[in-house]
Image: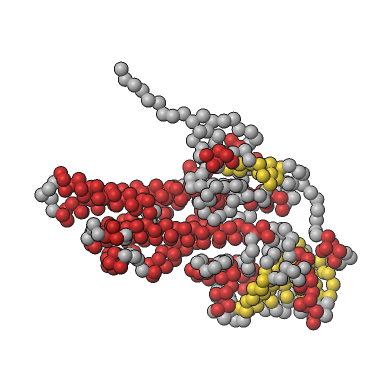
Amino acid sequence: MAIRIYPKKHFQKARAGNGAEILKKLEGYLKNSSGKPIQILCGFWKDQAEAITYQELREAIKEGLLTKAIFQEWSKDYSFLVHNQLSFLWKDALTAGSMSQPITVGLASYTFNVETPAIMAWIAEHSAEFVTASVIEQKEAIKALLARSVIEHHSVDELAKFIRPCIGLTKPQAKANLRYYDSIVKTLKEQHPRMKQDSIQRKAREAAAKYAEKQHRQRALTIAMTEMASAYNKGADEGIRQAQNQNLIGKVMKRWCTSGDDAVCGQCSELDGLEIEMDSTFPFKGRWHTGDDLTPPAHPRCACAVEYIEIEPVRTDNVAQEIKEVSNGAEDVETNMQKLGEIEIDKVDEALEYYENLFRDDIVENVLVIDKYGRVYYAKGDSSGVDIGKIDLTGAYITHNHPASNGILSFGKDDFDFLRNHQDIAGLRCVNEEYNYFVSVLKDMSEVIYNNIYKEAFLYYEEEEFEVQHKTMEILKREGYVNYVRQKIDKGTER
């Protein structure tokens, strides 16, 4: 009598709210979008393997480690990979995630901006984290293959030829591949005692290389699903925040959603249905990276999502009271800015500091302009930026704030573009919760390409308290283009 074994069924719990719809959208997006990053990553690792020479590998085997120069090259490789390819895929995922929430469906005037300072900050921080983690994983994998116990049982040439196809694997994958290689060598020796050693090693290498290709695809799939899910969920979070800044939805709670079946891991099962405030973090256990705990994923290949639920209607608050008091009676000007009045030129610094402390902690961007005649103009924007208008900025001082939701960041690309287009201003300032920033142009910046400097900044990601936009400005200062200062505020006396 034949015994038929049926695959295990996953029993799914009933879901409350819109969780099932949100999860279905995420599942569909991951299924349809993972192919491209998998292709990119597999090609990338193949290029890295071909870039390292057998001579370099032989030297590494003799010394027991790869040179620091090779690891630095890998860091550059990953930085370029992120900047030139993966970051664009993340932006696509962010945009898709921003449209995933039923709460924003039907909001006719809702728009999503993928170039906000908050998103650019997330991409910068996520990029640095991805580069660091990837290089460390790769370094540990090669280190395992260069262990003394491995070298003692393999010749230098044999190991050099074996290691090359393994570049890009994780440590467990590399060790598994070596065990597979050794098992094939052992089997061939036992079954074909007259076969030459070179032939045995060649056949074993060919089989191990095919296995490595499969392992690369498995690792690429894990990275693709995890990274795309991370960006997608971040996009959902940022989309809600932008809708709030557009006064389209009010106070929101968020609820963790899993598929509800018995295939969900224990950690995510515990989180399922948990409702917390918008800015609260989920209690992840053993976080697998140092990223944002505001949204999923909780672990590699996590397919969980968040549902955002409006619990209070939109508030109609306008400009902060402090600015209202200063602006009372201010006349309108031809631009969208308000003219607050005029000050003596020798009072410019005092005026700038006064207004900076009024809007330093605001949740949206504010800008203050003091032109060369001492006329003071003010405008308020949203979390993504603020428009100055058509004021003559020659010799003017401009200051603005970066909202806390955007991160503790120095001048970004938008600020750089503004500075390059207005090189005749007296100075550009910026404030946030922790720092004051100042920059002015020293020599012509017309031919400077921000992205080139930005990419160079990533080479310093191992520096303590690395912040890519600050490092970008430091490089511009080092090259003599700008005078740049970042000053930590004294919170005891600044306010």
Q: Which residue occupies the extreme left position in the image?
A: 194
Q: Residue at x 62, y 38 (%)?
A: 273
Q: Quadrant of the C terminus?
A: bottom right
- Horizontal side, residue 171 vs residue 387: left or right: left
Along the line of sight, the residue nearer the viewer: 46 or 147: 147
Residue 485 screen position, x and y as percent: 64, 76
Is 440 rendered above or below residue 382?
below
Residue 163 screen position, x and y as percent: 30, 58
Along the line of sight, the residue nearer the viewer: 402 or 460: 460
Q: Residue at x 41, y 29 (%)?
A: 7
Q: Which residue occupies the extreme top position in the image?
A: 1
Q: Quadrant of the N terminus?
A: top left
Q: Residue at x 25, y 59 (%)?
A: 152
Q: Residue at x 31, y 56 (%)?
A: 165
Is 37 rendered above or below residue 11?
below
Circle count: 0
Along the line of sight, the residue nearer the viewer: 482 or 436: 436
- Horizontal side, residue 318 vs residue 267: left or right: right
Rendered image coloring scheme:
secondary structure
Residue 94 screen position, x and y as percent: 57, 51
Residue 178 appearing in the image: yes
Q: Which residue occupies the extreme right position in the image?
A: 329
Q: Quadrant of residue 333?
A: bottom right
Residue 322 screen position, x and y as percent: 83, 63
Is 439 rendered above or below residue 147?
below
Residue 56 appearing in the image: no
- Horizontal side, residue 163 vs residue 270: left or right: left
